[in-house]
Image: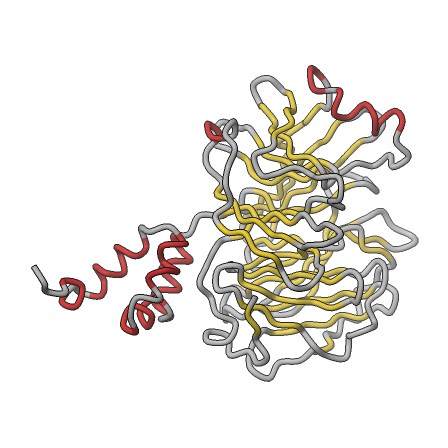
Amino acid sequence: MNQDLFRYLPSELFTDILLRLPLENIASCKRVCKPWLGLIESDAFLKFHLSKSAPALAVSMPTRDSNWFNLFRLGDEREHKHKQDPIIKFNFPQASTIQGSANGLLLLKNPFIDCLYVCNPITREFVELHGRLTGRFCMGDCYGFGVSKISGQHKVVYLNPKYNEFHVYTLETGSSWRSIESASLSFRRCFSSVGALVNGNLYWLVSNDTQNPYICCFDLETEGFSTFSAPVKSNVGMLYTLGGCLCFSDDDPFNGDNVIWLLKETEPIEKCWCEVRHVTKDGPYLDIFVEDYYYGQDFYKRLQPIKIYRNGDMLTLWDESIFLYYSKRRSTLKKIDLFGKMDDDCYYINSVLLTPSFLSLKRNLGMKNVRSF
């Protein structure tokens, strides 16, 4: 009865047991003993856990006195009626907005001092990205964060339309900002300030003075650019990642509709846009939109699609202020407070899907000057 059964348990069985535990329990197991810590911090466990980890919703609601982040589980469509408690709640030490996520890491930007940070909410690590770009950020800049398909390198991308400059920062030992040449690519405006990550590529909606907006693609593996057309000619469209596909969300302020397109890719390089949603801001929940559409001065309100459920319903974030649940069967939008709501001193809601992982900035990526929060 006093035997340590885990000592004689095969490592693959022990790993399988740990993978079935909630995140907070796995984190507690790291503090039990050195063998458990070594197993959980191994590259093999990290890879297995990341492959089985379900996407969660990272929500930031910055206020005058705090910068709290919450991480929520995303259940199925039956659970959208029940208030949820966060898996993890933490206060990041710097004012920041979410600029992207990849493999459990968040890219954050401080809007006041123009600094970039990468953090892992699970390991509570973060690092500030230093370099020659410090102090050069300006309005209209574009950012992106993702993982290359073959090498598995984590990269931060910075595009500057004003100076026509492109830079990449690889998260690894001794890394710094590198300039990327692209003689054929030139644009004056970036509509999608945050790049949408899909299958190892980052996408932004851009334009110049002579053409309609088009889509700029950056391959994180080859570090090469390409461009292609948007599904419609629109100056109010936005790019997102939705259901593993590139999503073009087109808000029409004149009739109150939101049309959503998904990009389907076929071999070898053909691209086909497919219209999957036509969200009508109408019906019994019109009161949500009346003030802004009829009396507000900011005419363009964004409807950010977050998740499509199996029955066709969809979770969305409207105008960075209200979570809405779209019913496909009823073609209606309903306000929900599952993931929190704005208080009087809250500036906005910043949200992105994140796959929780135990990826360590210091141990796995070898980065220096890693701090804890």
Q: Quadrant of the N terminus?
A: bottom left
Depicted 301 relative to depicted 55: above or below:
above
Residue 170 point in image, percent of width and height: 61, 74
Q: Is residue 301 left or right of residue 336?
A: right
Residue 83 as seen in the image, left or right of residue 188: left
Please report the residue visible at 76 percent of the width from the left and 70 percent of the height from the top.
Answer: 166
Between 19 and 7, which is closer to the camera in this rendering? 7
Residue 186 figure quarter: bottom right
Q: Is residue 133 left or right of residue 264?
A: right
- Pinpoint residue 303: horizontal percent, then vertical percent: 71, 36
Of residues 38 and 277, which is closer to you in this image? Answer: 38
The location of residue 368, given as percent across then percent down, is: 57, 81
Residue 22 location (% of width, % of height) = 37, 50
Give the residue displayed 59% in from the left and 59% down from the top: 106
Q: Is residue 144 left or right of residue 26?
A: right
Q: Nearer the viewer, residue 122 or 196?
A: 122
What residue do we see at 88% from left, 65% from top?
A: 162
Classify the position of the C terminus by image quarter: bottom right
Residue 98, quarter of the rendered image: bottom right
- Tell me: residue 189, above or below residue 266: below
